Amino acid sequence: MLIHPWDSATEEQSLAYVKDNQFGHLIAAGRGREVPVVVPTQFLLVNDRTILLHLARPNPIWAAVEENPKVVVSVAGPWAYVRGAWRAEPGVEPELGVPTTYYSSVQLVCNAEVVTADDGKLDILRAQLDDLEPGHGDPARMPRLLSGLRGLRLAIEEIRGKFKYDGQKDDAHRERVAEGLAGRGGPGDEAALRRLGVAPL
């Protein structure tokens, strides 16, 4: 992922974003594969260096993780297309403005530990359920569920955060874009407005 200095997020900012968006893609390159294995999944950021999750036993990612425990958790969104006219510099015809897309993205490079013991899998399930659905029944009472999955404990080794919202531009430019986003009201526009941190003109 290309990260310009003006788009770069601190580790603290990146982890706060991941904490608010605990669904992403787990990517395992394995060894000698033509393409990596990519699995969309819910996960739990336990602290600034640990992720827990579980997946079904038939999932194709297990073989890739066994070949190479280095994996990436990628989280991205929401995104907002920014029209070229909104980004046209003063004196430039609107139709010659350069469009872009605003988005947030964090990639966590991790070392994966596969958890197969029942007590370890229960710890992972309980932690995820406590976060997502407090008061849910104890997964220990669902033995068929437990036998049908494996757990993963991911040790975060590197954090790559990018918040692409024209951080290199001046406030006047960002205000023009904010005005366009506010007037359109598309699916990702509200999130982009919050990231821009300026009021529309």
Image: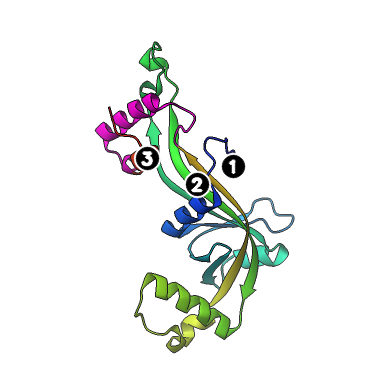
Q: Residue, x 55% and y 52% (percent of image)?
A: 11
Task: Please say if 109 is above or below 152.
Answer: above
- Percent x, y of residue 178: 33, 32
Determine which residue is flagged by label 2. Answer: 105
Q: Residue, x 41% and y 85% (percent of image)?
A: 138
Determine which residue is flagged by label 1. Answer: 1
Secondary structure beneath dot 1 equals loop
Q: Is residue 192 left or right of residue 50?
A: left
Q: Are marks 1 and 2 in contact (CB under 8 Å)?
A: yes
CA gap, disc 1 and disc 2: 9 Å
In which quadrant is the N terminus drawn? Answer: top right
Q: Residue furthest left?
A: 183
Tell me, yes or no, if residue 163 can be seen here: yes
- Percent x, y of residue 61: 61, 64
Query: Which numbered disc flags the more N-terminal residue, 1 or 2?
Result: 1
Q: Which residues are magenta?
A: 165-190
Within the magenta stretch, is there residue 6?
no
Q: Residue, x 53% and y 35% (percent of image)?
A: 6
Determine which residue is flagged by label 3. Answer: 192
> In which quadrant of the rendered view does residue 8 lie?
top right
Q: Which mark is residue 33?
A: none
Secondary structure beneath dot 3 equals helix
Tell me which colouring the rendered structure shows: rainbow
Q: Amino acid at mark 2?
A: Ser
Q: Are marks 2 and 3 in contact (CB under 8 Å)?
A: no
- Percent x, y of residue 130: 41, 75
> In which quadrant of the rendered view does residue 85 lie?
top left
Secondary structure beneath dot 2 equals strand
